[in-house]
Every structure is written in C-alpha cells, then in structure tokens.
Amino acid sequence: MKVLLIITSMVTHTIKTPHLGIGYIAACLEKEGYEVAILDEQIEKCSHNEIVNIIKERGYGAVGLTSTSENRFHTIRLIKSIRKVFKGLIFVGGHHFTYTAKDALENIKEIDVVVRGEGEFATLELMEAYSNNREFYHIKGITFRDKDNEIIETEDRPLLKNLDLLPQVAWHLFQLKKYKTKPSDLGLSYIGVMSSRGCHYNCVFCAIKTKSVSLRSPELFVDELEYLHDRYNPKAFQFFDSTFTINRSHCESICEEIIKRKLDIKWVAKARINNVDESLLSLMKEAGCYKVLYGIESGSERISKRINKNITISQIKKAINVSLKAGLKVTGYFMVSLPDETLEDLKQTVDLMTELIKNEGVTTTYAYTLIYPGTELERIALKERILPDNFSWNRYRIFPKCFITDSVKTIPYYENPNLKVGRIKLFIFMNKYIYSRGSWKLSLKTMFEMFMRIFNRVFKQVS
C-alpha cells in the first residue's frame, strides 16, 4: 500500500527543518514494506489543489497529516479538500490533534483516525489493520470513528522507553537541499536532530510532561550526526531534545563520542538553568556546541514557583556566567502575562532581561503566554473563564488582542484579569524596555510608531 505523509505549512514562520516525527513514521513504514512519500507543503510550495491532484494521480491508499495548533485550520481546510476526492484512510497526528482527538473527530467529519502521542508503532499497526480490512479496536493510542459512527478512544500507548528500537529517520524522503534554515548569529544551515524524548518537569504552559525521559544510545545518535554530516553536509545541528542536559551522563557520553570521532560540527541545544555547571558546559563546547538556550520565563521567583519552573535568580545568573566562561553564547527566553503576575513581577522580569544582556554573548527575548491544548494553563484558563465553557480547539475562533501579543489570531493568550495584555505592552514601552531582534534598543522612529499603534488601539484597556 502507498502512504502519503503531509507536513502542512506553518503560519508563524518560514524557517524549516525536516519534521522528525514524520521522518520516523516514514522509516517504520518503509521497513515493513510500505511505499511511503513525504510532502512538506511549505518546501514544495504546493497549493491545496495541487496536493489533491497528487493524491488522485499517484494512487495512495492512506494519507496522514501532522499539524500544530497554529496551523490547524489550514490543515483542516486541506483535509476537507482531500476528502472530496479521496476515499481512502485519512489520519492525523501531532501535538494539536493528540490533545484534542475526540473534539477533532466531533468537528471534522473528514478525519477517520487520530494517532495520539508517539506515532511510529501506532501508525504501523493502523496501516496493517487497514490494509487487511481489520477493525481498529485493538490498536493502542488512537481515536477513531467506527462503522456505527461512534467515536472510540483506545487506551493510551505506553511511551517508547528505548528509542534505539526506532530506525533512523527516513532522511532520503526529504528534499534536504530545499531546507534553508539558518541561525542568525552563525549564518549556517542546520538540521534538527533528537537524542531523547520527554520531560519530567511540570511547567504549566507545556504539554510535554512525562514521568521519565527516553534516550537514544549516544553511539547511534552520533552515528546519525556523522551520516548527515558526511552525506548532506549541514554546517550545524539543532538538538531538539526538550532539555539536552536533563540526563547528565547521557549528555556527557554524546559529547565524548563526538570528540572521540573528531567530528567537526557545530550545534545548539536547550538546557535547564539548574542542571548545568562549568564542567558540563565546557565539555559541550569542546564537542562543538556554540550556544545554549535557557527557558528562564520570569524574573520573579514567586512567579517561577507559580508556573512550576522553580528556578531562582541566583541559579539563573550562575548558569549564564558559567556558560559564558565556557565560551558559549546564550539566549534566554522569557514570558509575560503569566498567572498571578503583577506589575512588580513584570518589572523584575524586565530588570533581569536588561541586566543579562549587558553581558557580551547574551541575548534575551520575551513572548506573551499562549494557551495550548493539554497544558495545565488550559485548565487554569477554563476555570478562570478565559476560555469559554463551550470552547473547541477545532472550531474557528479569533482572539482579538493577537495584534498586541504578536501571536496567530486563532491561538488564545492567557490574560490575567488584573493585568491586561495592553497594560503589559504599555508598561514595557513606557519603561523603554522594548525588545527587538535580540537587543533592547529601538530607533526613535520605531518607538514612535509603536507608541502610536498602542495608543490608538489599546489605550482604553489600561484605564
């Protein structure tokens, strides 16, 4: 059977790297004899009509699509277009559909099956059942509509504990030369890779919460780095692990393997403020790491506890200092409009960002807190009526202050009842702590234009 896997266009940015989840699913299907193709809509620059024609002409038996919450309605429109001409199986996956599975089937009649969570072996079992005309009830980790039009949700599939059971990503199915992602500070094209899955921390804004972290063996992971380096010659890699330093011995073993093989690569990874030290960071630097990304979120320790981040200001400053001492660049990520945040908390965040960027090699950025399905923040927002009781992630709705939060108009933002997002933006502006492109400096012309925009559109919110 021929299977088409579609990566739908992102609406938030044009920077792309191959989708690892789709790459792993394709590899598992190929290993079992399925004829698989990957279509990355943004890379191929296909219209919906062109995709529909491809499906009609090439005789696929099943079509799978992945979607984020940001581009979900674009994906839904494509699914509806496909269903008009395609009688085979349409299945979907990815974080958005994983956490809205039942709601998706209730609102999108064109979808046959949602694959929840890790999709490799669930998709393989689904294809085996479908191609042999068998029922789906025995397949763990899916939600589907049966012959009686009832929505059935099977039990969750256990997380894959040993990632070495997966074949290598089907890199040959991606048109890697068309991916032009470049980190701005190095100007190097890169490919995203992953050495672990999961995160056992419990931040309220994140849906990735697992009691354990699954690992790939350092040798196999570095095998993949070496393969990609030799065959496709990317100039850098981004490690997509939720927290690359979450397991110290794993992190050290990967670095030591890179060094042992004398693999001349550059890479960037996410780390956590309270699980790094100078020794580990120096080893990462020796192995080719040039930059670490820290999720700091808030300059208020009270808010850090409230959102389950649980890091202190002294830990933040120490981690930044030892990172710089090890010769690494640093980007710190912050959030504003968090639950229970006050103007004093916001001031502490702004002050910390301002202090950190005085260090050469440090950039900081902030974003308004957005609500995503499956997060604790979603439950908080429902309880506080920020999201209405009848809210559906798969029915079109616009959130009108998206022009303030600089977010996609269909993504809800968390807005503290006592600290409106317009007031936050005005506070930041009036203190001249406006962040743009890694710097806290703006031209007078840009500042004036932003002031007029804020004044004309949100002044009423701050009274």
Image: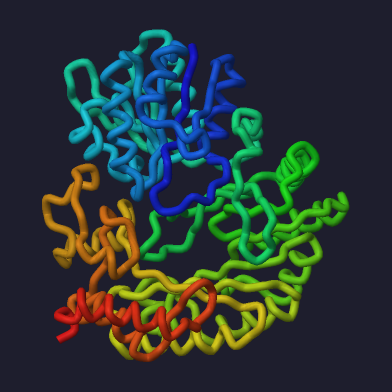
User: Please, is residue 431 above or below residue 114 in the view?
Assistant: below
Q: Position of residue 395 (x, y in %)?
A: 19, 43
Q: How is the image coloured?
A: rainbow
**Is 110 situated above or below 372?**
above
From the viewer's perspective, tell me whether residue 81 is left or right of residue 311: left
In percent of the image, x 26 and y 19: which residue is there?
84
Q: Position of residue 422 (x, y in %)?
A: 24, 77
Front-lying residue, 241 or 408: 408
Residue 243 position by quadrant: bottom right
- Decide if residue 28 is in sight here: yes
Q: Given the current orientation, which residue lies at the most extreme front position?
A: 445
Q: Residue at x 47, y 39 (%)?
A: 42
Query: Which sits in the foreground, 311 or 80?
Result: 80
The extreme top residue here reads: 132
Question: Which residue is rendered at x = 28% and y = 32% of the image?
Answer: 153
Q: Quadrant of the C terminus?
A: bottom left
Answer above or below: position of 133 versus 102.
Answer: above
